[in-house]
Amino acid sequence: MRVFLIPFLFLSFSVQAKDLSVNSIHMVDHCVKTNSDKIIYFVKQWHLSPTVDTTKIESSTQLPQYKNQFEIFSAISKWVAEKKIDTAIAEGCEGEINSKFKEIFNGWNMDSLTKEVNGKNFDSILTHVLMKAESKFPEKLKTLCGDDLSQIKYAQLALSDLRGDVGYWKRIVENEKNPVKLKIYLDGVIEMLKLPSTTDSKTALLALKKDVLSSFKKFTDANTERDAALVRAIKNTNSKTPLLIVYGGLHSEDLKNKFQNEKWNCEIYEPKSYENNEEKLLDEFKKIIN
């Protein structure tokens, strides 16, 4: 398995929708308006891999995802206090986030977060933002999970392969006129893709392109399944108030289309500090494919 990154994102708009824009978060898109009473507020997030330990609170504030997550949590706290939302659906988990939720994100779980709720550094904790919100507002916010954990694993593996392919592709192209360095990367591709030892750079690039095509399809298929799981979760909610969804920005385009197919109203929000790194990475994959 190669190095991987985990992604996460969403929002909505309706006749009855309220613009949730605040200083740090603004609406960037919305669904076609309908008469549906289903309203979805989708917030794009740039989140940390759940395996990264952030229990050293002060040092975790230096991580690049911190500002994005802090802005989202601050906005959620404001929306809950103003009673604009009371139900949220989270990425990265299945079931419901409540006092019995046992999953660990960044070294934190519901028990450890609950112990810190009244502490001066609670708002600065960098972890699953809706798990953190649920621990702070257990009586005011119902937090459901909308993801498919098996498809997350498939997406992670495919993304890991894609990142490896792109890395080798760049190095081979950059070193075409440097035989010594070219051989190092060419040997790496030969070993990774099980190619004949006599493979030249042109053939290696073609093999990488084929692998990118295969891995890209696996990645997009897995994320499409994840998005379909979210739609099913939304359909199973009985909430009469707008639903808040916090997912990786990578999901926004497909989810917007799915929301519109259901004739739901949606608004899509983006924090000022949001970084579309994953979208840029996908653009690199597409350039190789095309």
Image: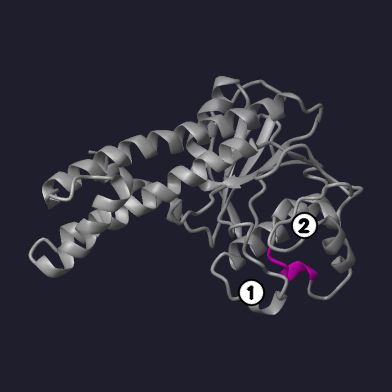
Residue 247 spot, x, y in % from top left = 60, 45
Quick check: can you spot residue 23? no
Please tell me whether residue 258 is drawn above or below residue 65 in the rendered image. Answer: above
**Residue 125 is covered by the magenta coloring:** yes
Residue 229 spot, x, y in % from top left = 63, 30
- In the displayed image of the protein, which residue is found farthest to the right? 139
Q: Disc number at residue 132?
A: 2
Is 94 left, or right, of 120 in this rendering?
left
Amino acid type of the residue that numbered disc 2 sits on in the rendered structure: Lys
Magenta extent: 122-126
The foreground one among 269 and 33 is 269
**In the rendered structure, which disc, 1 or 2, sits on the residue that comes first in sequence?**
1
Residue at figure coordinates x 79%, y 69% from the top left: 122
Disc 1 secondary structure class: loop
- In the displayed image of the protein, which residue is found farthest to the bottom? 58
Residue at numbered disc 1: 61
- Label 1 vs label 2: CA separation? 15 Å
